[in-house]
Image (cartoon, rainbow, N blue to C red):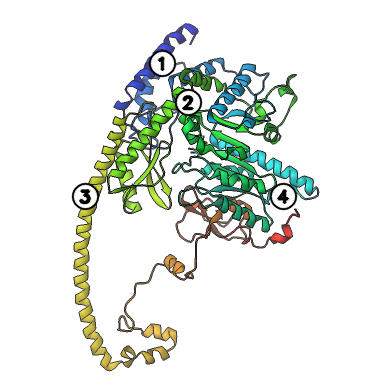
Amino acid sequence: MDCNEFRGRGKDMIEYICGYVENIETRRVTPNIEPGYLRKLLPKEAPDTPEDWESIMADVESKIMPGVTHWQHPRFHAYFPSGNSFPSLLGDMLSDAIGCIGFSWAASPACTELETIVLDWLGKAIGLPDQFLAFKEGSRGGGVIQTSASECVLVSMLAARAQALKRLKQQHPFVEEGLLLSKLMAYCSKEAHSCVEKAAMICFVKLRILEPDEKSCLRGKTLLMAMEEDETMGLIPFFVSTTLGTTSCCSFDNLPEIGPICQKFTSVWLHVDGAYAGNAFICPELKYLLNGIEYADSFNTNPNKWLLTNFDCSTMWVRDRIRLTSALVVDPLYLQHGYSDATIDYRHWGVPLSRRFRSLKLWFVLRSYGISGLQKYIRHHIKLAKMFEGLVLKDKRFEICNEVKMGLVCFRLKGSDKINEKLLSNINASGKIHMVPANVNDKYVIRFCVVAQNATEADIDYAWDIIKDFAEELLDTQAEKETELQDEVFELLERKKKETLAQKRSFFVRMVSDPKIYNPSIAKALPSTRRHLTQPAESPENPITVQPPAHMSVSRRQPPSFKRTASWISWPLAFLFQGISEEGAAGTIRFRHLDTKVRLKAAGKSPNNGSPSPDGENSRSPKRSPVSSRRGSPTNNELQVNK
Ligand SMILES: Cc1ncc(COP(=O)(O)O)c(C=O)c1O
């Protein structure tokens, strides 16, 4: 394709995109296809000879689009928004055309400089303290664009780990790094995004997942107790990840409480993940939610979620860029340049070397909308979420399950998790609107997020009508089923009554011939096994009791004082650290975010070659500390590092 053809095709593509955006409502929000659908439609190999553009575009519409979930659809209310706007699309288009790889200032100076400037603009608009801004007098901080929030959390944890290990190595020069590493403990709330757990797995550090309060908010006291407890066990707190706007229910950890706690401990890195809600802090009336940020070492938010900027654009700021980059610097000769002392080289700020010119689209967005335009957009989404909340609250069959501060509403039918699961699966199967579930306060809830850029009140009304219709249908069939069930129970009771009468009659007959049945003292005098053997099917002293299933009887045996512990270790991680203690022993691991259990067989012993297999039973209690339960390994005191 030459420039001339590109000009034409480019115009056609813009036309296609505009048509897609304008008519998106005519499409089903989620695809109605089966896994593997595309493989059947496309050739097994890449074409040997060039194909004409028309046939490629024809396939886009006939083969690709049927398998697309339309995240920009006004009926899409799942997850968080996927940022999108025309200025951003154009910015990305230009960035793709320039095609530079801005890993260092010298590799493309404008790419680096625009990123630093735009991050200062946005950081200031959000209300970050001056220490996070690159161009503030005396500041050691600055911002960077990463691919995703997950990467921001990982990079922060890597920096915190490097800082902690460096300090420990200075204190204990003759202790192996591996041993020091095994002492490091990171913390987050149960409501934190799973990317914190993943980061801990990659960093090979322990992660303690803490119980939030009833508002899904991590409190300072909980953190303090956990950190102190760990310190007494010889562990070393080094990283705390907090969330402003959690994924499940958009709750906010209590930063003003958590910040001072982190400062009580030597060099604990405090990260604040505001992937979605962080964008909203550009509105002055929402800045109070950022209180406590002055204690943070790093902060991230994704304009590619809620600031009209296309993926990928995850912005991250650090208070001290040297502490970040010293964890990530490698400096081969071919990447060095003469200005490295005076410039930023973003290759030291993240995992990949190559990086796109992502600041262009953010710059386009900030300039095209202005801060006031972006504030209007955020406020509009919040207003619509509040409107939806109002509709739910008016209907007594439903309840709201989160504090609606942003564009996310968590709600459920008053009733069982099952019925809510059924409601959501019926709605999603219809393809009329799309939502996803979450677990809030141990209840299955449905998340309704205002997502579409130009969402309207009519869209909210439409969604609510759909939800109500499906709920009514479900409750009706439920009521019918309940009537049927009541009839069945009635019949069963009648049958039971008749049987009991018959048994009573036979009991009276046997009483005459067998004193054990009616004289309890004789029955008690018998050995227990015999007593069991001779126990009648039913007697006044021994009425028939239904035995609970094995897993229930275990919990019944727990003392009445049994209470859930407040926190637990990330289990995939604990497994890595703990290993399989006995040759051939199998372990069951609970994967928190998948809400599933996997039974792992020891290497060589597994009938399925050691690959995990789902297993709902026999789960090991997630409350058992991998530190104290480690078998055959040195005790904590033996491993203790003198501090
Ligand atoms: C609070 C929070 N943190 C992190 C993430 C992960 O984001 P990313 O997909 O950019 O890694 C999400 C995703 O929704 C999130 O809500």
Residue 451, visible in the rendered structure: no
Q: Which mark is residue 180?
A: 4
Is residue 521 found left or right of 177 in the rendered image?
Answer: left
Q: Earlier in the sequence, mark 1 or mark 4?
A: 1
Residue at the spot x=58%, y=51% of the render? Answer: 223
**Residue at 46% across, 20% down:** 369
- What's the mark number on residue 476? 3
Contact (Cβ within 8 Å) of mark 2 with mark 4: no
Q: Nearer the viewer, mark 1 or mark 4?
A: 4
Q: Secondary structure at mark 4?
A: helix
In this rendering, the answer to whether 64 lies above or below 519 is above
Q: Earlier in the sequence, mark 4 or mark 3?
A: 4
Tell me which label, 2 or 4, sits earlier in the chain: 4
What residue type is disc 4 on? Answer: Leu
Q: Classify 279 as above or below 539.
A: above
**What amino acid does circle 1 point to?**
Met
**Kind of element beneath mark 2:** loop
